[in-house]
Amino acid sequence: MKKVLFLLIFLLITNVSYSSTFEITISNPQYKPIKVGLWGFVKSTPEIVSKRLINTIKRDLDMSGIFTPDLSQHFSYEAGENVINGIARLDGIDYVIYGNAVLEGKNVYVNIKITDVLRNAVVIDRTFSSNIYSLNWVADKMVDLLIGYVTGVYGPFESKIVFALGNGKTSDIYICDFNGQNIVRITNWHTFNMLPKWVDSDEVTFLSYRYGKPSVFLFNVFSGRLTKLFNASNLSIAAVRYMNNFAISFNRYGSTNIYVINQRGRVLRKLTDNPYINVSPSFTPDFSKMVFVSNRDGNPQIYIKNLNTMSNAERLTFQGKYNSSPSISPDGKKIAYISLENGVSYLKIMNLDGSDDKILMEGYSLDSPCWSYDSRYVALTGRIGNKNMIYIVNSINGHVSVAMETKLIYNGLSVSSKLR
Amino acid sequence: MNRLFSFVLMFLMAFFLWNCSSNRYVKNTNNNLETPSTENVSNPQPSSATLKYPKVNVLQENMSLSELKKQFSQIAPDINFKFNSYKIQPINEYGINENPQDILNNIVIFLKKHPIVKLRIEGNCDERGTIEYNLALGEKRAMAAKNYIVSKGISPDRISIISYGKSRPLDPAHNEYAWAKNRRDHFVIVK
């Protein structure tokens, strides 16, 4: 009897201990930042130059999600590589950035070196001629070179983000660097301008209510040339590049479909033919496939269509009742999109066939995901409390950083290709 | 004789002066204004009236339009929708209890009573969806209200629609009550 009782107690204890197991979620097991010594410039470097360069390099390193900057040391440029690498090794640092700059009138000559501590060698040594206002670009380029050296894929910081920012009554178009610096407003029309999209290295399209009826404009950001692209509908949504033309969603005969229009706004081709909502086209680099959003099955979901065969669109998303804003990566391998569940929005990525679907980020009011030209980072807008953000997300390790923060409302975002 | 001559001369001068005076003309004009002839009533001259009193006329026109708008705003509040829906249906959630069809019926009566009036329907969404899809959804919401009004006998030429998506929230808060208010069609008299 005692043995049976003992057995029962033993079973009870083992069962309880089994049911009380818990889970540990390890979201980014590979994420281990690489330490980069940002040890500044030689003392003769003008402070305005060194400060600007270091601030931007530090910002880029932080946002990359790959590196952790270390500013604990300050070295003279004349210090030998062996000295620098020796101390860096002691501090557990993997790379060191240092340099020299000379200011001559309006010109700045900058020499920057990056040493690989493990190899005990200078691996990048570049000299740039610039002006004081373009120093950020020099810093961006050095970080891109370092990312390229470490990962094999050139970094994303030599691009621009175009975005719309409004207060609920008006909204204007702005451009900033990929890291959120150097903000420039390009419209000041006291009306609603939204959904800007890069369609070329120097051109953006955007939707405007400037003349009451929504119109899509084409704007050259360098020359300032403005062209009205399309306004032949009471609903026209942002235009994206489709070969040498544009793809645009607009309402015709009561249904919103995706059309191809030329530079003069003439409709050339209909890419979807469905009586429901069909919006947000994004294309593979060879323009053979298009992903888009449609509510043809009741809720907004993401579909893919082969444009060579013009076969029926295939649905890609089946989880959740709201999946929208698809964006194909420039290498044509991944789709980033926004999924909405119970008031919380998620940035997800998946393969072109819908496989390997995973959550990259969770937040509120996430919108307008757009890939950087290296197909590694995703820029998007979102909200924390009453503050609205532009986030930069590393799609490989899930690192999230904030490029911009404001109380105003974002009305669209797009990332350019690599700019010269 | 001289006395007779001077008396006749004075009489003639007095008569001449009486004839030259404008009293009779003024008196007659006044009579005309006070008791207008039937000819004047049947043939009004709006052009001369407009020229004489342009400011008064413009003011009256503005007042009538503003009065129309005031009347319209009382009978045509925003109609609301459920999340991700553009179906016109009764709603009783998050502080909103309305039957949009009642509001639309009032708008139909108003439009029939004022056949010159033109209407713009503005479709709006809450902040949760994405911008591009919400623009299309807002347009569907505006279109749903337009179709209802047209089905009640109003010419479609009198109704224009526009979508603002989620860019013009009525309530900027981030909760279900604010979102319910922001999923709406707003009605505006444009002429």
Image: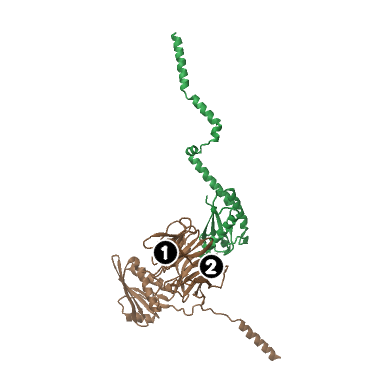
Chain colours: A brown, B green
Residue A172 image offset from top left, x and y in percent: 44, 60
Q: Amino acid at mark 1?
A: Val
- The x and y percentages for residue A335 are 48, 73
Describe the element under mark 2 as helix, strand or loop: strand
B45 vs A326: above or below: above
Q: Position of residue A155 (x, y in %)?
A: 40, 74
Q: CA distance from mark 2 to mark 1?
A: 25 Å
Residue A198 at least partly seen: no
Q: Quadrant of residue A18?
A: bottom right
Residue denoted by label 2: A294
**Quarter that holds the N terminus of chain A:** bottom right
Q: Nearer the viewer, residue B172 or B150?
A: B150
Q: Chain of mark 1?
A: A
Q: Which mark is residue A347?
A: none
Q: Which residue is mark 1?
A: A204
As drawn, the residue found furthest toward the front would be A309
Q: Quadrant of the C terminus of chain A?
A: bottom left
Q: Judge the density around disc 1: few (<14), some (14-19), many (≥20) Cα neighbours within 10 Å.
A: many
Instruction: Give the class, few, some or many, for how many residues have Cα within 10 Å of label 2's Cα (few <14, many ≥20).
Output: many
Q: Is residue B74 visible?
A: yes
Of A26 and A185, the residue lying toward us: A185
Question: What secondary structure is marked by label 1?
Answer: strand
**Residue displayed at 54% across by 47% down:** B66
- Image-based side of B13 in relation to B183, left or right: left
State whether residue B151 is above or below residue A332: above
Which kind of residue does numbered mark 2 sit on? Ser
